[in-house]
Image: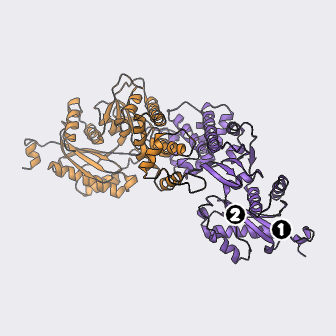
Chain colours: A purple, B orange
Amino acid sequence: MSTFVKRLGGIVTNCYLGIDAGGTSTRAALVLPDGTCLGTGRAGSGNPISAGPELAAQNVLTASQAALANAGAEPSLLADGIAAMAGSRVAREADWLNDPLHAAGLPISLTLEPDLLAAFLSATPQPDGYAVVAGTGAVAVRVRNFELERVTDGLGWLLGDAGSGFWVGHQVVRHGLAALDGRADPTALTDALLTALDLDPDAPAEVEGRPGAIQHAVDLLYTWRPVELAQLAPIAFEAAREGDATARAIVHEAALALRAALAAMLAPDISGPVVFGGSVLTQQPTVAEIVGAQLPEQEPILTTDGLVGAANLALRRGGITVTEAVFDRLTETIAARR
Amino acid sequence: MSTFVKRLGGIVTNCYLGIDAGGTSTRAALVLPDGTCLGTGRAGSGNPISAGPELAAQNVLTASQAALANAGAEPSLLADGIAAMAGSRVAREADWLNDPLHAAGLPISLTLEPDLLAAFLSATPQPDGYAVVAGTGAVAVRVRNFELERVTDGLGWLLGDAGSGFWVGHQVVRHGLAALDGRADPTALTDALLTALDLDPDAPAEVEGRPGAIQHAVDLLYTWRPVELAQLAPIAFEAAREGDATARAIVHEAALALRAALAAMLAPDISGPVVFGGSVLTQQPTVAEIVGAQLPEQEPILTTDGLVGAANLALRRGGITVTEAVFDRLTETIAARR
């Protein structure tokens, strides 16, 4: 008798597989209908756009097999599963994902689900509500009956992502350099930016009548991919806490943009809950407070683990009712295996 | 006796070569010390960064030879010359440019000069003053004694160019899409943008809860190079003229950014003149008026032809005093050959 069946007291039970397939890593959770997580697994990028479909499918398979191994469970116990990923509706045809799984002996076909739906369902067992996620990018969604009904923003660094980490980091650079360039009021962002970039603020003027530090910053920053400016966002949050007026204005504008995204999602017949995800909302209480004021009767629920939502969705799609108790068990038992 | 010497009444005179070496085209003017333009020539990009030094040097040579041929003049008449180009101080070593010229029998060595200095000197014979140039990019300079003393902005689309054509076009896209996305007040920019992009505003919602037109715009615009958004700037100027509040705010903010750049350049001992260049300042009177208000006693001089400044600088660097009369003759005789 396997470890797994022993742990279940000898009762053979169907298991469900929730996959959180991100651009950086893929995580899998094997869960029981009562919400107990039996095992988790991890692999590299499971996003077919960033990693290519072959590698993404391989990583989903690797994470799934690792979760089964971690649980000491046989593949034959698998009843159903879902994989949450960005852009998953576009890629509704999932043969690229399921053919390699079947070839490896997994007896289920994963359904693709939007990662934004999993983000919402990682914080609540409710069928309806809202989520605002602001990390490198920024997006807001309305969920109705366990489906994404409406999405706003998430248009990427050039065209949208208003209030995101990229947006804030971009403003840090533009305002910090404008002040050094004499075009804006002095701000603490300038020195903090040059420090972060390891540049000498007093570098002699060298090139075409410009302060040397500006030319050095420009030479450096154009070697970055634009989205990498997101890593400079913490400079604004820290300077804002210390009272810098320019930084405060940037953070305030970011919060208003995220609040406008949430406002755009509101439907009169859905009062909440409201889920906040991403570092800008989960780690910056000033921002969260302004965005949360859009729905003053709701206390926003912060979420950091999309895997809970993927497991929640795997049970839902498998026909299991996820009660508050089941949801709480999912949250606790997945957290215990991080 | 050659056509050229006949035209000069038989008196052999030194000629000066002014080159405006841009990223798209290179123009050359052969001028006399009295400001008379004897001939002009044209070739492709003369910028060593965008075209590579070999091709850039070849284009400068081609344009120079075309100007000599246009004038019916022998290379031996050349006394001196300059080539105005972006980033020219960085590339002070100009062997890459002059070696091919010498090999082709031109008996002069071109001095590199900043294109921004030529922009200023294309509008005035004065030694001191200011220039603000806002086309795709945006930059302001202070000129003292025929040298660039200080430059602000011109930091490119990602880090600066505040108030430029790119900046305005970028705002058109962001605000136009935000309104369509429900995150901002309706604006005429949305329909004008979709029309410019040849997209159907009523495309059915297709992808992940987003209006179809947004997804189509995103799919299209990320195939562009970011700077190409500059071509959408006219949408804002037209909508602003027709009273759209969002467009007016964008145009106003652009003008204030350009005004701040000019303000950053002011020195107490230089009152003017102020030269405006680039389509945003030369074709948008609303913007020019706001920027010009920074120096209310000066009537800004609009300039569109950097070749006049290159010729002006060629005479200056050759030791010729460019009086108002000489400058006016440069302007008239170069314009006559456009």
Q: Name the mark on residue A83.
A: 2
Q: Earlier in the sequence, mark 1 or mark 2?
A: 1
Look at 68% across and 33% down and name the residue there. Answer: A242
Classify mark 1: helix, strand or loop.
Answer: helix
Say yes or no: labels 1 and 2 on the same chain: yes
- Measured as percent of width and height from the top left, residue A61 is found at 71, 70
- The amino acid marked with disc number 2 is Ala
Chain hosting mark 1: A
State how far apart marks 1 and 2 are (Cα). 19 Å
Disc 1: which residue: A71
Q: Residues within 10 Å of mark 2 (few under 14, many from 20)?
A: many
Classify mark 2: helix, strand or loop.
Answer: strand
Relative side of B49 to B69, left or right: right
The outermost residue toward the top is: B297
Chain hosting mark 2: A
Look at 22% across and 37% down and name the residue there. Answer: B330
* Screen quadrant of the N terminus of chain A: bottom right
Decide: is A76 above or below A313. Answer: below
Foreground pick, A313 / A63: A313
Q: Residues within 10 Å of mark 1 (few under 14, many from 20)?
A: many
The outermost residue toward the front is: A269
Can residue A52 be seen by looking at this rendering? Answer: yes
- Measured as percent of width and height from the top left, residue A82 is found at 71, 64
Relative side of A29 to A59, left or right: right
Relative side of A124 to B80, left or right: right
- Measured as percent of width and height from the top left, residue B111 is found at 31, 45
- The amino acid marked with disc number 1 is Ala
Q: Residue A59: name its quadrant.
A: bottom right
